[in-house]
Image: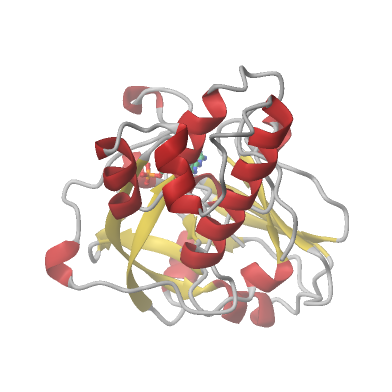
Amino acid sequence: MKKMRSLIIPGVDKQLLVKDATKLMPDLSRRRFIASGASFGALTLLTGCNVSDSLSADNLLTHISKFNDMVQAKIFNPNVLAPTYSEKDVRRPFPFNGFYSEDEAPQIDGNDWKLEVSGLVDNTKSWTLAELHKLPEVSQITRHICVEGWSAIGSWQGTPLRDFLKLIGADTNAKWVYFRCAEDYSSSLDMPTALHAQTQMTFKFDNQILPQSLGFPMKIRVPTKLGFKNPKYVTSLEVTNDYKGGYWEDQGYNDFSGS
Ligand SMILES: Nc1nc2c(c(=O)[nH]1)N[C@H]1C(S)=C(S)[C@@H](COP(=O)(O)O)O[C@H]1N2
Ligand SMILES: [Mo]
């Protein structure tokens, strides 16, 4: 298994690592962890690592790194399908999240918008929304998990990213698919994740055109990755061998974040 860095911004108080580990836990583990006092003892219980008698910061880092490995392996295994849920599990309205408040979210005119395509692809033609809406539609009901400590089940419709990559003649041996967004947001997806069966170019939530809050006109839904690797308001896609990071990736969040 790949070694994890902690999912916090470097230089942050080491005590906050425990808090951060809490945020990464699946709902049930988190509830148990919090119920038992969110202590090192409880962390030991859940992780199977004895952190209580090795409280030096470095040891703690190592233990939480192991803990992240465990959580990520369990809930974000890239080689298997993410769990799917039923209609009745869908959160309505679905929570908004961004690095700004909801009323500051990009407002995009779908008639002007185009998806730019660049990099290692045969066809760099831009795509209008009308063209993209004609692509075959699939649906998924999956859980979105944000490192900030919340998760919610959503229903997303769109076209599998891997089919689109095939359509544009992308070099699928390239390392990354890099997405830019209408605001100052971007994110990099490793190619195996971009080709994962559930990774979706998403145009609808709950069978309705995406509302502005959820990323109109297009987001990338990646149920095998953490929320920040699900870019909304996408404006361009680039297939590349150069790692270009992303908004949160550049601030020290693990690129791995999920797999
Ligand atoms: N363009 C853009 N995409 C983004 C973000 C953002 O701020 N801007 N935030 C990310 C984070 S951290 C999360 S948790 C999800 C939130 O998606 P939602 O608003 O549909 O819940 O979007 C991700 N994609
Ligand atoms: Mo997030």
Residue 91 appears left or right of 197: left
Q: Looking at the image, which residue sits at the far left?
A: 88
Q: 252 or 173, which is in the foreground?
A: 252
Q: How is the image coloured?
A: secondary structure
Q: Looking at the image, which residue sits at the far front?
A: 53
Residue 152 appears in the rendering: yes
Q: Residue 123, how many percent across, how many down?
A: 76, 72
Q: Residue 168, how many percent across, how many down?
A: 70, 76
Tell how many labels: 0
Q: Quadrant of the N terminus?
A: bottom right
Q: Looking at the image, which residue sits at the far right?
A: 242
Q: Residue 216, how many percent across, how many down?
A: 39, 48
Q: 125 or 73, which is in the foreground?
A: 73
Residue located at (65% from left, 81% from top)? 167
Residue 176 appears left or right of 235: right
Residue located at (28% from left, 53% from top)? 28
Q: Residue 34, how many percent across, how many down?
A: 30, 36
Q: Is residue 60 above or below residue 30?
A: above
Residue located at (58% from left, 76% from top)? 196
Q: Is residue 50 above or below residue 137?
A: above
Residue located at (27% from left, 41% from top)? 95
Residue 111 appears in the rendering: no
Query: Which of the 4 quarters of the picture holds residue 205?
Result: bottom left
Residue 214 appears left or right of 193: left
Q: Is residue 60 above or below residue 93?
A: above
Q: Quadrant of the C terminus?
A: bottom right
Residue 171 appears left or right of 136: right
